[in-house]
Image (cartoon, coloured by chain):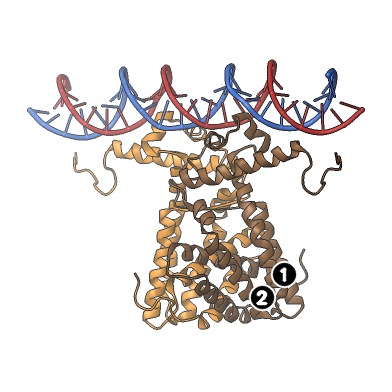
Chain colours: A orange, B brown, C red, D blue
Amino acid sequence: MSNVPDLTKIRGKREETKASNRQAIIDAARIVFADLGYGATTVRDIIRATNLASGTFYNYFKSKEEVFQALQDETALRVRPRLRAERIRARNFEEFIVGTFRSYFDFVKNDQTTFIAVRRHREIPRVRIDTPEVIAGFEELRVDIENAIENGVLPPADADLLMASMVGVAFEVAHQMLTRDDVTADDAARFATALFLGGVQALPRKAKPGKKK
Amino acid sequence: MSNVPDLTKIRGKREETKASNRQAIIDAARIVFADLGYGATTVRDIIRATNLASGTFYNYFKSKEEVFQALQDETALRVRPRLRAERIRARNFEEFIVGTFRSYFDFVKNDQTTFIAVRRHREIPRVRIDTPEVIAGFEELRVDIENAIENGVLPPADADLLMASMVGVAFEVAHQMLTRDDVTADDAARFATALFLGGVQALPRKAKPGKKK
DNA sequence: AGACCTCCATGACGTTGCGTCAACTTCGCG
DNA sequence: CGCGAAGTTGACGCAACGTCATGGAGGTCT
């Protein structure tokens, strides 16, 4: 009998149930948040939806906020590589912009459940929470913008503000897309792209003179 | 002697303490939220910061969420008239855009405490909550955009998406402004304005054919 | 294979905040 | 002044919180 454990797969039953418990909590949370709304759900509601004991929850997360972050992070980690790939592939200004928006809106459209679930709060009309992974995604965009500027793909503008603008437009337009049902991912992407294609040319040069910091 | 009550001022001691209690709760909440962060704050923390009894709280709000909304609404009701005035005064495209952004960023800059307080959560990096009054402000912008389009001040674009874009850019750029300290309200306004002045020209024509709905 | 130890799931427990409610105080009005 | 309406108070029952001692299952060493 081979006693060589498959190192890349199973690290023992210990680690296995650990991962499975964590995932069970996250999955239960996704359902419960969507069902009761974020504010109304309690840690107890979440563990009740698993077959784990209350104490176990606290071995994995220290509050429902932390589970929520894990949920958001999961999503962020799924989108980021796609966006990144699009931008790296871009050989010019237009491709940079259109690639980013297109794949983001496509993702949102195909993944509506997650996004809608998150917004389905009862008490509060609309909420947005940025977790570390989401913020890391913003940072990635900023870096890509800076590189694009250096390579002459983008005109020299303030990278922070340009990143912020793209993020803002992406989120708000995506929200419209989910609210109205007559806006396709393509409509959204064409709108956002046109705005930036036209707008970026006109931007003032860097607000801050030198490099960052 | 005069038993004619000043109708516009005091409607009797009853109404007076009612208003004062409500305001006391809101004021206490503003401080406590800023201090402990939104998530960590409890209803008890808020009433402890007033000299009212716990039961009294529930005569005015039914949860901390509701107090928070009242706080947001207070702010929204202060900004909206200014933005509206700017847009109505606008005699052309540029004035419409620049007026809106300038006064919004000025407001945020002068009112940092409110905005920073709201963001000073411990558990969660960054949060945004839209209350009914805030959403009403968005709607106001949308209507103004539609009117501007009808009057030929703005080119015919999708008003919903244009509104969403302006909102997104306004929020995100304002956030940058508060995070970095080298961005003035003027920098922010010039950036956002340039983006839209250049970008709006290039927008696709209305995604939806006829009038709204 | 067995003994041993480590790790973690369990659920009961004390604590804290929740929302309600009966008793009481204050206001307005005749 | 006296009565009813309106609103405040804090104690109470209940639910969720986060912890911790216990036990059982997984890994390791001989």
Name the residue type under label 1. Asp
If you read the primary sequence from the N terminus, does the residue marked by circle 1 or circle 2 appear first?
Answer: 2
- The one nearer the camera, D16 or B123, is B123
The percent coordinates of residue A206 (x first, y second) are 43, 78
Q: Nearer the viewer, residue A45 or B194?
A: B194
Q: Quadrant of residue A111?
A: bottom right
Disc 1: host chain: B
Kind of residue indicated by mark 2? Phe
Residue beneath disc 1: B144
Quadrant location of the C terminus of chain A in the rendered image:
bottom left
The answer to whether B143 appears left or right of B42 in the picture is right
The residue drawn where x is 70% and y is 69% is: B85
Where residue B45 appears, as percent x and y from the top left, is 52, 36
Q: Are marks 1 and 2 on the same chain?
A: yes
Tag 2 subunit: B
Task: Indicate which disc residue A77 carries.
Answer: none
Q: CA distance from mark 1 to mark 2?
A: 9 Å
Foreground pick, B110 / B65 = B110
Using residue A31 as the reference point, say whether residue A183 is left or right of it.
right
B137, above or below A9, in the image: below
- Residue under the image location 37 percent in, 81 percent down: A151
Residue B36 shows up from this direction: yes
| Of labels 1 and 2, the one closer to you | 2
Residue A103, position as x, y percentages in the image: 50, 66
Mark 2 and mark 1 in contact (Cβ < 8 Å)?
yes
Residue A66 at x, y = what percent?
A: 43, 44
Q: Which mark is residue B96?
A: 2
Q: Quadrant of the N terminus of chain A?
A: top left
Q: Secondary structure at mark 1?
A: helix
